[in-house]
Image (tube, rainbow, N blue to C red):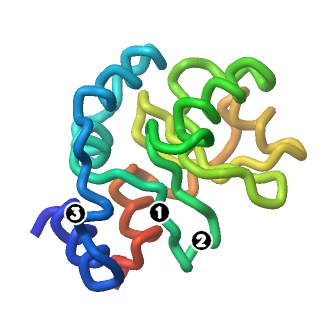
Amino acid sequence: MNIICQIKKVLDDEDDLELYTRKDKEKVLQAFDRLDVKVSRLVEEFFLNLEGPFWGESLGMLFLDIINDDVNIESETNVCRNIHMFPKQYLVLTEMVADEIIVLDSMNDKVYRVDFEGGDIKLLNGELEEDWNSFEDFLRSYFGLDT
């Protein structure tokens, strides 16, 4: 069973899957265009199929939707680009909690926990160690599929 099907099962068990089923697929593609970023097939498929935001007990952070709500991946990524000079390859996946965010590097599909007490500088300098080797690993951890 692929990762998106596994996540759908988790969401359906916890809630009503219909709440998380993407209805506005074209807006997702438009958001990636506005962000001027090329993402992996899994990242694109995830947001074309599912809409958030999502709450995950395992990390205690809100996993944002690409476009839904006022605070979303597009808006938070633009904030980090404008204020912290993040290059286009980085997408902010979560809301900020305790001065920390989770960031996807779209060029290598690695995912990082980034704090703004030096972690941001390490990320920009290529010195920060990834927390997840891939977006799929992040999804598995976030949705509790690490078993």
The quadrant the N terminus occupies is: bottom left
| Tag 3 secondary structure | helix
Q: Residue 59 appears at what percent x and percent y?
A: 59, 71
Sort mark 2 into few (<14), some (14-19) or many (20+) by Cα contacts within 10 Å: few
Label ID, residue 88: none
Which residue in the structure is indicated by mark 1? 54
Name which residue type carries label 1. Phe
Q: Which residue is painted at 51% across and 41% down in the image?
A: 104
Which residue in the structure is indicated by mark 3? 3
Name which residue type carries label 3. Ile
| Mark pair 2, 1: CA separation | 11 Å
Q: Residue 76 appears at what percent x and percent y?
A: 64, 35
Q: Residue 143 appears at what percent x and percent y?
A: 40, 72
Q: Looking at this view, name the residue that lies furthest to the right.
A: 117
Q: Which residue is painted at 44% across and 53% down in the image?
A: 133
Sort mark 3 into few (<14), some (14-19) or many (20+) by Cα contacts within 10 Å: some
| Tag 2 secondary structure | loop
Q: Nearer the viewer, mark 3 or mark 1?
A: 1
Q: Which residue is painted at 80% across and 23% down in the image?
A: 83
The quadrant the C terminus occupies is: bottom left
Dot 3 or dot 2, earlier in sequence: 3
